[in-house]
Image (cartoon, rainbow, N blue to C red):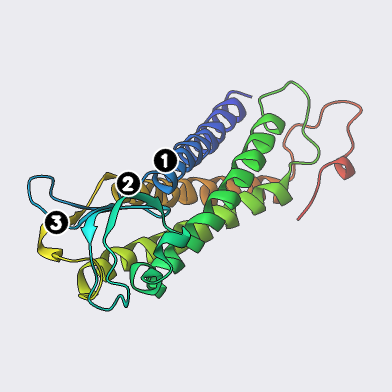
């Protein structure tokens, strides 16, 4: 009995670690998604570019030679505003749009993932009753979702950081610009998803191993057929 209690407590700790990491990572991802400080200019230098996030950009008199209207852009605007129609293809190259799409889909998927994680957390709480049907399908869903998200986010954010410095046609005075805290939060969220993936994979493996094992102590009135076998 004591061994079973310790085993159950250890299993619970593993899941709680993954659950907490997913919640923290999702909060960080949402903050990064909404904040306009992915790439900024040093504040003490004069540059027509000030900062850009996924959905907001700030300029201070930017004039592009390729702009047929030779219009000067000032202030902070939504990246999809009609104001930037003539320079949008320059301001939002393909790799930037990919990052927008990945983050948008990722935020939505991870909000659903948090909901599923909460459901599993509630269904696997310690109880005196025997859990005949562990929510293995939901456990599989959160495990796969977290693993895939960690991989996709890692590839996307690393490529974003590389493209910022290797795309010399994007944003003026690159030597005066740098990746800022919004991008850092996105990377930190990715690390949390990676560690959460490890925790959920371990938990999933424990659950499957327990479901394959025959119970050692079967209480009176409970038949072996009531236990799922895999």
Q: Quadrant of the N terminus?
A: top right
Are the residues tagged 2 and 1 within 8 Å (C-beta)?
yes
Residue of label 3:
47
Q: Residue at x 39, y 74 (%)?
A: 89
Q: Residue at x 64, y 33 (%)?
A: 121
Closest to the observer, 83 or 97 = 83
- Give x and y (percent) for residue 96: 39, 67
**Dot 2: element:** helix
Q: Residue at x 65, y 39 (%)?
A: 115
Q: Residues within 10 Å of mark 2 (few under 14, many from 20)?
A: many
Q: Residue furthest left?
A: 44
Q: CA distance from mark 2 to mark 1?
A: 7 Å
Q: CA distance from mark 1 to mark 3?
A: 26 Å
Left or right: 189 as drawn, with respect to 175 = right
Residue 205 shows in the view = no
- Give x and y (percent) for residue 214: 74, 45
**Dot 1: element:** helix
Residue of label 1:
31
Whichever of labels 2 and 1 marks the residue nearer the N terminus, that label is 1
Whichever of labels 3 and 2 marks the residue nearer the N terminus, that label is 3
Q: CA distance from mark 3 to mark 2?
A: 20 Å
**Dot 3: element:** loop
Quadrant assignment, res 161: bottom left
Instruction: From the image, state whether disc 1 or disc 3 is nearer to you.
Output: 3
- Give x and y (percent) for residue 135: 74, 43
Residue of label 2:
182
């Amino acid at each position: 009995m004591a061994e079973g209690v310790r085993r159950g407590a250890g299993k619970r700790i593993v899941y709680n670690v993954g659950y907490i990491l997913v919640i923290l990572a999702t909060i960080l991802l949402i903050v990064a998604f909404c904040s306009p400080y992915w790439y900024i200019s040093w504040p003490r230098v004069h540059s027509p570019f000030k900062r850009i996030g996924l959905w907001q950009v700030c300029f201070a008199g930017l004039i592009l030679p390729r702009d047929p209207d030779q219009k000067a852009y000032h202030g902070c605007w939504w990246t999809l505003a009609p104001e930037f129609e003539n320079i949008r293809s320059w301001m939002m190259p393909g790799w930037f749009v990919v990052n927008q799409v990945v983050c948008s889909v990722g935020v939505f998927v991870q909000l659903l993932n948090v909901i599923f994680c909460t459901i599993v957390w509630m269904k696997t709480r310690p109880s005196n009753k025997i859990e005949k049907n562990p929510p293995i399908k939901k456990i599989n869903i959160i495990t796969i979702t977290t693993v895939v998200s960690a991989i996709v986010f890692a590839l996307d954010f690393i490529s974003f950081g590389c493209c910022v410095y290797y795309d010399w046609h994007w944003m003026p005075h690159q030597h005066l610009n740098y990746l800022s805290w919004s991008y850092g939060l996105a990377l930190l969220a990715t690390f949390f998803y990676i560690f959460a993936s490890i925790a959920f994979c371990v938990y999933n493996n424990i659950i499957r191993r327990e479901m394959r094992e025959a119970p050692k102590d079967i209480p009176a009135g409970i038949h072996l057929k009531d236990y799922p076998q895999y």
